[in-house]
Amino acid sequence: MLNETDKVWLHGVIAKISNKMEWVSEKTKDKIPYTTINGTYDDRSADNPTGDAADGLCWWTNGFWGGMMWLMYHETGNEKYKEIAQISEGKLDQCFQDYYGLHHDVGFMWLPTSVANYRVTGNPESRKRAMHAANLLAGRFNLAGGFIRAWNDLEGQDTRGWAIIDCMFNIPLLYWASEETGDPRFKQIAMKHADTTMSAFVRADGSVNHIVEFDPFNGVVVKTYGGQGYEEGSSWTRGQTWALYGFMMSYIHTGKEEYLQTAKRIAHYFIANIPDSGVIPVDFRQPAEPRREDDTAAAIAACGLIEIAKRVGPYEKDFFLNAAIKLLRTLDESRSDWTESTDAILQNGTGAYHSKTHHHAIIYGDYYFIEAIFKLKGNDLYLW
Ligand code: GLY
């Protein structure tokens, strides 16, 4: 339960989000942003920083801007948010033609855009797009290993047997496809992938691996990688949150009790590692110096913790809810820029521990922060 102080704080944050999104949406309506450059959103629908098909219009985060607009439409009823969401959704059609830029992240791309549009408006074109994406995702399933292949080949790296923890966030697209069509194949694949993830990624202490490599011919685990975290065997915080919230989503769609228990185990590990400051590092097992933090992980964790809190008894509920509120208050009070000097809200996201740059705006940080705040209010639009 939120106490009176929390309610006042929440009310204030919602007002700040509404004010900021009012003007940011206007100036960004024809873009699909990823980060800010000198305070202004870039445009991944027009710019391609590396020339790789997956890094421009088909960049994996290109669903989040549309998702933010749907959240704002649900909150305010202002038609302009719906229209802006639909502009970005339409642009993504080109990715089906390009094809090579697409990999398992089609869930991140089309759940907050086309599935959201279909859920809200019933638009048959959006349903068709989402079904295309779901079929692409299902087509990446490896029968021998019971996992969904993550990326396409990376330079000099055979990734046929690679699965990554982030995929727990893509498989809700498969649950949606089965719920929508009545065809169980999509859900069967999603559950098989979730079961494999439970056994091959989640460690005894509740932490998770980022990447597991399977032999793509016989399904045997070959090795694990640290991926976007510090090193092999470490604990990349955003990966922990893809797992925490991801298993909750699998529980919500299937009712399978083990998914809830797994989400709770990961959540206990995560909460036990939150520093007193409430600021989340890039990896829970990184060295103390240099300082490397990732606000996106805090925002995603908060969403997952609130979803757990909705489905447990009163004592546990407060435990998970209070942890989420601590993360969100830290984000609001010391990690956000509410002024007009920058388009983004959260200022300290980090893509990967070993990235060249750290502590910058990343679109999904703002997306999950807004989702978490509306969840706390109790009337969020559930896009997953
Ligand atoms: N899904 C990739 C990432 O979290 O950076």
Image (cartoon, helix red, strand yellow):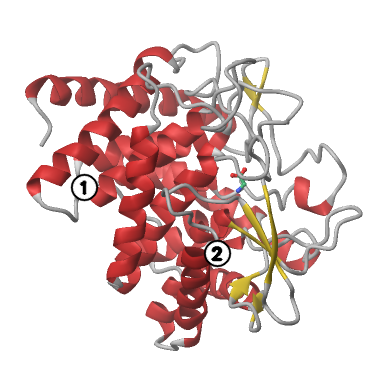
View quadrant of ligand 1:
top right
Q: Which residue matches tag 2?
A: 200
232 sits to left or right of 272: right
Residue at 73% across / 68% down in the picture? 161
Q: Amino acid at mark 2?
A: Ala
Q: Is residue 357 visible?
A: yes
Q: Position of residue 261 (x, y in %)?
A: 30, 60
Residue 243 % position (x, y): 46, 53
- Visible residue check, residue 382: no
Say what secondary structure mark 1 lies in: helix
Sooner in the amino-acid sequence: mark 2 or mark 1: 2
Relative vertical location of residue 327 with respect to residue 173 in this rendering, above or below: above
Determine whether the beta carbon of the residue marked 2 sits less than 8 angstroms from the nearest atom of ligand 1: no
How far is mark 2 from mark 1, CA to CA?
A: 26 Å
Q: Which mark is residue 309?
A: 1
Rendered residue at 53%/45% (across/down): 239
Looking at the rendered image, the quarter that the C terminus falls into is bottom left
Q: Quadrant of the N terminus?
A: top left
Residue at 86% across / 57% down in the picture? 157
- Is 86 displayed left or right of 213 in the figure? left
In front: label 2 or label 1? 2
* Residue 289 against residue 197 in the figure, above or below: above
